[in-house]
Amino acid sequence: MAAVQTDGLAGAMRLSAQCMDEVRAGQQSAHYCLGLESASMMLLRKTVPATLDATTLDWFEGEAMTNRVLTYCYTHLALKGDMQCLTLMGIAKAAVAPLLAE
């Protein structure tokens, strides 16, 4: 959360890319990465789009983010349905929301 709060969405993008690689290598929990994606979504809503560069905007574009989240849910957590994935995203959002409010 410190990197996201300090570097904003650019930091979140960097951590998000790193997170997927670490999950694939078995070095990070997909739950952690879902929390990071949730924090990114909340931060994106608070950010004026004109202040972001094209690469950052593309990374957090709806379809790109959805694909990452679904990869965590279905591939790495072996969930069987969208509702299970949405439930985990809700839990992740509830966990990181207080940290972003600070």
Image (cartoon, grey):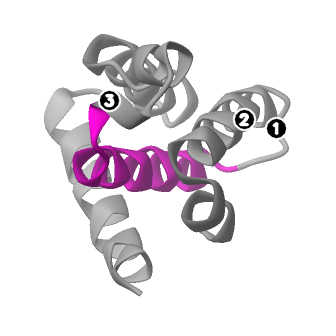
Of callouts 2 and 3, the N-terminal one: 2
54 or 87, nearer to the observer = 54
Residue at (32% x, 73% y) in the render: 97
Among numbered discs 1 and 3, the one appearing first in the sequence: 1
Q: Residues within 10 Å of mark 3 (few under 14, many from 20)?
A: few
The image's mark for residue 26 is 1
Q: Which residue is mark 2?
A: 23
Residue occupied by mark 3: 50
Which kind of residue does numbered mark 1 sit on? Answer: Gly
Rendered view: 35 above or below 40:
below
Q: Which residue is found at the position 18% from the left and 29% from the top?
A: 82
The span shown in magenta is 29-49
Is-magenta flag for residue 32?
A: yes
Residue 4 in picture, x, y percent from top left: 58, 58
Mark 1: secondary structure: loop
Of residue 61 and residue 73, the one placed in the foreground of this image is: 61
Q: Give the structural element (helix, strand or loop) at label 2.
A: helix
Within 10 Å of disc 1 (Cα), the crowding (few <14, some 14-19, many 20+) is: few
| Alpha carbon separation for disc pair 2 and 1 | 5 Å
What kind of residue is marked 3? Answer: Ala
Label 3's element? Answer: helix
Q: Are marks 2 and 1 in contact (CB under 8 Å)?
A: yes
Apparent side of residue 3 relative to residue 98 in the rendered image (left or right): right
Q: Amino acid at mark 2?
A: Val
Taking depth in this image into account, of 80 and 10 the one nearest to the observer is 10
Q: Does the magenta portion include 34?
A: yes
Q: Residue sitting at 52 percent across and 21 percent down?
A: 75
Residue at mark 1 to residue at mark 3: CA–CA distance: 36 Å
